[in-house]
Every structure is written in C-alpha cells, then in structure tokens.
Image (cartoon, grey):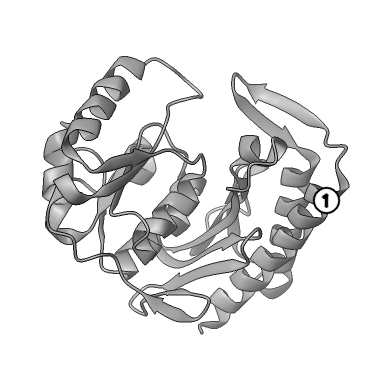
Amino acid sequence: MHPMLTIAVRAARKAGSIINRASLAGGLKVRSKRANDFVTQVDQAAEEAIIDTVKKAYPDHGFLAEESGASGGATEYVWIIDPLDGTTNFIHGFPQYCVSIGVQRRGALAHAVVYDPNRNELFTASKGGGAFLNDRRIRVTGLTKLGEALVGTGFPFKELTRLDLYTRQLQTMMRTSSGVRRAGAAALDLAYVACGRLDAFWELGLAPWDMAAGALLVQEAGGLVADLKGEQTYMESGDVCCATPKIFSQLLEALR
C-alpha cells in the first residue's frame, strides 16, 4: 500500500471511531447549514481528526474539506475530505453513511479511501493500482444491458431548481433499468458500483468531496465515470454518472 494511502486509511479509521462512539452516545447537536443540509459536532470532530492525522505526516499538503473549506494554499497534493457523507442518515440512525477521503496530485485523483464504520468496510484505491474492499480486489460487474442494471441515484435535496430535469431522468431510469435505489450517501453509492453491488449511479449537484474518492474507486475497478455529457468535468459541474463499461453509453443516452 502506498504510504499516502496508509495515512488516509489511518485518518479514515480515526474518524470512523468518532462516528461510531457518537452513534451510541446520543445527544447530537444538529445545525442547519442551509435547507436540508445539516452538520453535527460529529462531522466537525471527524474532520479535525482527519486533518490532524494528515498534517502530522504531510504538513505541506493542502485540504478541501466539507466543513472547513480550502486550506493550505496551492500545493502539489490536495486532500478532499467528507468526514461524514450521509449526515442526515446518521442523525436519524439510518446506517448508510461513511468517511470519504480523496487525494489529488496536480489536479488528478491519486488515492482514495471510503470507510463505512457501520459494516467496517474499507474501500481503497491508488491510481494504477486497482481498487480493494478490505484488501480484496474488487471489479465492476460485467453487465452489458441497462435493462438488467440496478442503478443508484441521489435526489437533488439541497437546491431544487433542476427537480423537473431529475424527475424526468428518474422516470426514464425506472422504465429502462431493473431497479433504482436511493440510499443517501453518494460516496458509498460510488463504492458500491466499484464492488458490483450497483451497476451504475448518477446524481446532480454534488460537491467534490462527495465524489473524489468514489470516482477513483470506480475507475480503478474498471468502470467509467463522467459528467452527464460524457466529459471529465464532473468534479467542477457536480453532475456525475458512472457504470460498467458496456452499459455506460446506454446510461448516458437514457439520462439525456
């Protein structure tokens, strides 16, 4: 395992321990950042633990984190962090949330960790090194027909200006796939495509920390990732879709 990935795993597990302790303790303090977008003291504590762990090993690296934003200036390496993807699920005790850590080198994704503290499932990837679940190599499915695919998605809950577009896409996918699932944690959805639990995924209006780690997992597991135009601007646009190679073009066509 690459030394940088080792640090990312250590940081994710520390954050996961904070999350697990809080899930048992109760007494959450919840604050609304904007409509339908919440933060707890757990998000903040987990993010601090991740950044502190990384800074001890790489004090000159930069960060882009959900709660604290950008820090560290322009550097070769930037750590893209979602300390608790699926906060609303966590608040309600719905066990579908995770820690997501992606590392960019010169703007390109280099390392990824998605850690599910509920199931103790650790998804990891390094550019060119493959994707793994608890040290076992994972691959996307070999499915060839969108009509047989189980497709993940996420509702546009933060801003609803494109709800009509999403509703049309959802109707199309319900007609053309074997089923659609919405679990509420995009990083885990992407990881599930990487390990074959889902065959495809799409969502509108995500932030970079929602996608960075999961996108690299999918790519290193043999899948394709793009925006809804088929271009590599999903980290900027926030619109992402991914799938197994043989149904990717079918997915894009259906979403258009």
Say if residue 107 shows up in the picture: no
Task: Name the amino acid type tagged 1.
Answer: Leu
| Location of mark 1 (residue) | 24
- The answer to whether 232 is drawn above or below residue 123 in the figure is above
Q: In this view, does 219 lie to the left or right of 89?
A: left
- Relative to 17, 109 lies left or right: left
Q: In which quarter of the image is residue 176?
A: top left
Determine the residue positioned at 15% across, 53% down.
Answer: 247
Residue 67 location, quadrant: top right
Instruction: Please rate how many residues cluster around mark 1, counting C-alpha atoms within 10 Å: few if below 14, some from 14 to 19, many from 20.
Output: few
Q: Where residue 200 sits in the image (x, y, percent)? A: 28, 50
User: Which residue is nearer to you in this view: 116 or 131?
Assistant: 116
225 vs 236, nearest the viewer: 225
Q: Quadrant of residue 197?
A: bottom left
Q: Residue 142: horizontal and vertical position, in percent?
A: 19, 66
The reply, left or right, for residue 193 in relation to residue 88 is left
Q: Name which residue lies at 15% across and 31% down.
A: 256
**Relative to 211, does residue 197 appear above or below in the rendering?**
below
Q: Is mark 1 on a helix, strand or loop?
A: helix
> What x and y, as percent, mark residue 69?
62, 42
Viewer can see residue 178? yes
Question: Toward the viewer: 255 or 67?
Answer: 255
**238 over 222 or under it: above or below:** above
* Total marks placed: 1
In the image, is 109 to the left or to the right of 47? left
